[in-house]
Image (cartoon, coloured by chain):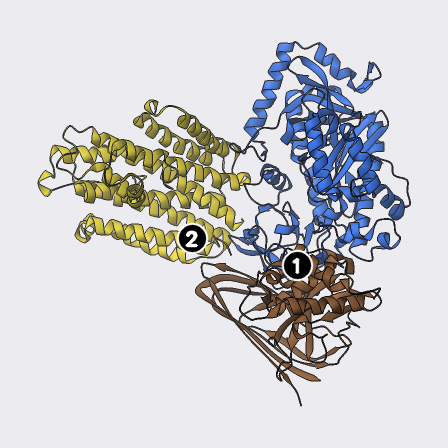
Chain colours: A blue, B yellow, C brown
Amino acid sequence: MYDGKRVRPAYAKLLDWVESTSPEALSQKQRQAEALFRRIGITFAVYGEGGDTERLIPFDMMPRVFTEYEWRRLERGVKQRARALNAFLYDVYHRAEITRAGIIPADLVFRNEAYEPAVVGIDPPAGVYSHIVGIDLVRTGPEEFFVLEDNCRTPSGVSYMLENREIMMRMFPDLFRATRIAPVDDYPDRLRRTLASVAPASCEGQPVSVLLSPGAFNSAYYEHSFLADQMGIELVEGQDLFVQGDFVYMRTTEGPKRVHVIYRRLDDSFLDPLCFRPESMLGVPGLMNVYRSGGVAIASAPGAGVADDKAVYIYVPEMIRFYLGEEPILKNVQTWKCADPSDRKFVLENLADLVVKEVHGSGGYGMLVGPKSTKEQVAAYAERIKGDPAAFIAQPTLALSTCPTFVDEGLAPRHVDLRPFCLVGREVHLCPGGLTRVALKEGSLVVNSSQGGGVKDTWVLAD
Amino acid sequence: MLSRTAENLFWLARYMERAETMARLLEVGYRMGLMPSAGTGYRNEWASLVSAAGSARGFGAKFGEEFHQRDVETWLFFDRENPSSVISCIETARQNGRAVRTALTTEMWDALNGAYLDLREIERRPRSEALLPELCEWTKRQGALFRGATEGTHLQNDGYDFLNLGWYLERGDNTARLLDVKYYVLLPTTDMVGGSIDTYQWTTLLRALSAYRAFHWAYGGEYSPRKIAHFLILNPACPRSLLHCLDTVEYHLDRLAKAYGSRTAAHDRAEAALGELTAAKVEDVIGEGLHEFLTRFVNQNAALGQDVADGYLFGIQ
Amino acid sequence: MRLSVRHTTIYRFDAPMRFVTQSHRLTPSTCTSQRIVAWEVGAEGAVFGASFVDGAGDRVTTMTVEGPVERIDVTVTGEVETFDAAGVLRGHREIVSPRTYLRPTQRTKANGALGELAAGALAAAGEEGDLARAHLLAAAVAEAIAYAPGTTEAHTTAAEALEQGRGVCQDHAHAMIALAQSVGLPARYVTGYLLTGGEEGIGEASHAWAELHVEGLGWVGFDPANRCCPDDRYIRLGSGRDALDAAPIRGVSRGGGTEAMDVTVVVAAQQ
C-alpha cells in the first residue's frame, strides 16, 4: 500500500475512515465480522492438526485495494496466461507440437504424474480443459506482478472472495456508497454460464450442470455447497450419479435425470474406479467412458493438472510466446530446478536465501523459507533435496508488497498475495477482485490458511 | 430433488425425533426411579427402558447384566457407541443436515448446529452438573426448535414432505415402543393393575409423551389401559397417536404422488394400514393383545420406511 | 491363419446386486497382423453404450446391468484372420506418445532386483540396437520367472513375481515392462488370445504379453512366457500400462453380495 513513504492514493479514503474511527469501534467491528463468519459457517479444515476439523479462517476487515488502471493490466496478464495454459493442454493431449518444437522437454510432459494418457485425443467442447484458472500473484512494485503458481485443476477459495465481500458490504455500507467498488457477486452466475457453454454437442435444450463433491468430510465442502447453492445447481456426490448407455444420470426422487456438465471438485484419481483408482468409492464407475465418448463435459478436464505442475510453470512464458505469439504480461519468478545439476548446486549453496517447494506439493506444506529457517532446518532440507532432486524447485524470496492489516497493536503492514479467478468457456472472464491472503505473523511470507494466514476483501476501485 | 438429499432430510428428521424419544425414555426411567418402592419386586425399569430403546444387546456387551441408572444414562444419552443415544442421534442428524446444507434454511441449520454446539458444551461440563431432568428438557427443546424452524421457514415442497415422512414414521415407532414398555415390560402382575404403582406408571408415561394434560382433557377420570390405548393408538387428535402419525405419513406421501405424478409401493402400504387403523376399535386392539398389536405396527412401520427408500431411489445405486 | 474365439465370463453374486457397471476392452482392432472377420460382445439384460477408441487405438465400451441381478454372462464370439508380422505392430492407429509408457505403475515398478536383472542381461551386449536389447531382456525374464499357474495373484507385482521366481503370463509381462523401463525403453502390457494346442504353446487361450517401443520399428511384441514374439497364433485385444489398465473387463458391482467369476476361452484354428 505504501508508495515509497507515501500511502498510495487508493487507500486514502480508507485511512481517513480508520483515523476517524475509535480503536474500540474498530475492534468491535472486527468482532462483529468474526461473529458473522461463524454464523454463516465458513470454516476450513486443517490437515495434520487432529481434533476439530472445522475452524474459522481469520478475516481481516482492512481490504486490499487496486485501482482500475492497475487491475486492467493485471487482467490482461491473467487472461493471457489462462489462454496459453489451455492451449498447452489441448496441444499435449493431441500432437504435442510444443515438445516437437523442443520448447518443453517431452519427458517433463509425458512422464509427468499429472499427465493423463487416458484423455489423449479428446476434443472437449470449445477446446477448454481448465475452465477455472486461479493464478497466484504477488506484487513487488507498483507495476510489477509475479506469478507464484498456476492452479488449473480446481482452485479453491472463491467462496471466501464472495463471503468477504458480503460481510464487508454488511458492515461498511458507507464505504461502499462513498467509493465505486467493482462488484464480484456475479461470479456464480458467470461460472454457471461458463459451465453451460461447454455442454456436449449431444445436449438438446437447457444443459443440466452439477457440482461433484467428495462429500461433507472434505475440507472445502463449505465452498462446494456454497457455490452449488449460488449457482442453483445440484451438489452431488459420486453415489448420486450413474452411467447407463451413452450418458450420465443423477438419481432423483422423480427418477433418473441426465447430467450434461460436471463441475468436479474431486481429484482425477478418484473420478472413475474403472479408469483410475479401482478402490475409489467417491467417483462414478464408467464416467470417463461417457466423457471420452462425448456424453458429458467435465470441468476441469481430467489431466489438466499437467499445466499447473511447478516444473512446467517454468515454461509458461515460453508457452505464451509459442501459442499466442505475444510477450508475457505477468512475470514468472525465477525458478531453479533441482533436477538440473548446475541449478541444484546453486540452490544447495544458497539455500538460506531461497524458498524451496515440492514440485507436486500444495497448500504451503513441505516448503522451506530459507531466511526464516534455522540452520538445522536448512541442513535437514538440503538432505531432502539431495535424496530426490527432481521433486524440488527453488525460488528467490521476493520483496512482497504489504498491506495494512489489523493486528493486536492496531494497523500494521503484513505480506499479501492474490488469487484472482479466471473463467474460461466460450469466453474468457476475469472476476474483478479475488482472494487476498495475508500472512498474519509479522514478517512471515507464508499466506496459506493452513499455516496461519488470513483473508481480506479485494477491491477494484473505478477510476 | 436429488434422492440423496431426500434421504438425508428423511433421516435428519428421524434422528431428531429419535433423540427426543431417548430423552422421553430417560425421563420415564427417572420418574419411576423416584417411586419409593421401586427396584424391589419388580423387573428393573431401567432394564426395560434399555430394551424399549432397542439396544439391550449393546448395553449388555458394555456394562454387563446389571442396570444401574448412571450406566443407562450414559448409554442412552452420552455414549457414542450406542447409535441411538441422544448424542449419536443429534450428531447423525447434523451430519445428515450438513450433507444437504443447501436444502435447509439458515434457521433450520442454526437450530441443528446450535444443538450440536450445546451438546459439546454439555459434554465438557462435569457429569455431576448434568442433571437428567435438565438434559431431557434440553433434548426435547432442541426437537421443538428444529421443528419450529422447519415449519416457519422451509418451503412446503417435496423436501418438506420427506422431512415429515421421517418425523412421523419415527414418532409412530416411538409411541408404539413407549406404550409397549409400560404395558408389556413394566407391569409385573395383574393384581397391581389399578393400584398406585400402576397409576403412577401411566402418569409417568403420559408425562413423558407430553400428553398428561391432553389425556385428562380428552378422557378425564381414572386411567385404564383401554382409555390410554385408545388415546395413544386410535385418537386422531393426539399428536403422538399411531393413527395420527400414519395419517400424516399418508398425507405427505399423497402430496409427493401429486407433485411427481406417480405412486409407489409405499402409497399402497400406507393406505392399507391407515384403512385398518381407522376402522379399528379399541376392543380389536385389546383382543389381538396390545403387545402383539404394537409389534405388528412396528414391523409394518419398518416396511413402510423401506418402501419409501425403494420408491424414491435412496441408497447407493 | 483364421482363428475363431469364444470367450465367456460368468459373474455370479451370492446376493442380488443393485447395479453393475463394466468397462470393456474386448474388441480387437485391425492392424497388419490381424483382420477382424466377425466380432460380437453380448450379455443378456445389459445396456451397452459410451463406446470410443482410446488414444492407444483400443475400442472401449461400457456395459451396465440394472439390478436386482444374480448372474451376468458376458460372451465374446469372433473370427479373425491373422498374419505373422514377427511381433511388429503396424497399421495400428494410435496417438499416445510412447514416452508415457516410461512411467511405471505400482505393479511394474522396478526394484533393485529387477534393475540388476536388466543390467545383467545387457552386460554382455555390445553396441547393439534396441531390438537386440529387447530380445535379451525377454530371454532374461523367461529365465528368471518359471511358468507356474496358481502361484501368483491378480495383484502380484513384477518385483514380487521375480522374488518368488514363478508366475504366469501376467507376471512375465509385468517383469518385462519393469526391465524395459529401467533401461529407458517404453513398454506396455498387451492382452489377447492365443491358439494353444500342440506342445510348444504354454499359457492359456486368454493370454498377455508385453510390447516394447523400439526406435525405427515402433511397438514390438514380446512373449517371454513362450520365448517368442507374437505370430499368427496371436490375436491382439488391447493394451495398457499394466494388467489393471489393460484389463479386458473392469467392473464395479454395487449391492450387498460378493462376486464369483468363471472364465472360459476357446480359440480354434478354422480349416
Reading the image, the residue beneath label 2 is: B308
Residue C108's disc number: 1
Is A217 left, or right, of B57 in this rendering?
right
Q: Nearer the viewer, residue A149 or A237?
A: A149
Is A198 left, or right, of C67 in this rendering?
right
**Image position, residue C152 (x, y; %):** 55, 65
Judged from this view, the residue extending furthest toward the left is B191
Viewer-nearest of labels 2 and 1? 1
Check disc 2 and report its element: helix, strand or loop.
helix
**Quick one: label 1, few (<14), some, or many (20+) residues within 10 Å?**
many
The amino acid on which the numbered mark 2 sits, given as a three-letter code, is Val
Q: Nearer the viewer, residue A92 or C200?
A: C200
Residue B281 is at least partly visible in this image:
no
Whether B289 is drawn above or below A418: the answer is: below
Residue at x 20%, y 43% (from the top left corner): B185
Q: Do tags 2 and 1 sit on the same chain?
A: no
Check disc 1 and report its element: helix, strand or loop.
loop
**Quick one: label 2, few (<14), some, or many (20+) residues within 10 Å?**
many
Query: Hey, which quadrant is residue A156 in on the image?
Result: top right
Whether A117 is drawn above or below B85: the answer is: below
The amino acid on which the numbered mark 1 sits, given as a three-letter code, is Thr
Check contact, mark 2 vs mark 1: CB within 8 A: no
**Image position, residue C220 (x, y; %):** 76, 70
Quadrant location of the N terminus of chain A in the rendered image: top right
Is A336 left, or right, of C270 in this rendering?
right
Residue at x 87%, y 44% (from the top left corner): A318
**Image position, residue B94 (x, y; %):** 47, 37
Kindly identify which chain the residue marked by label 1 belongs to. Answer: C
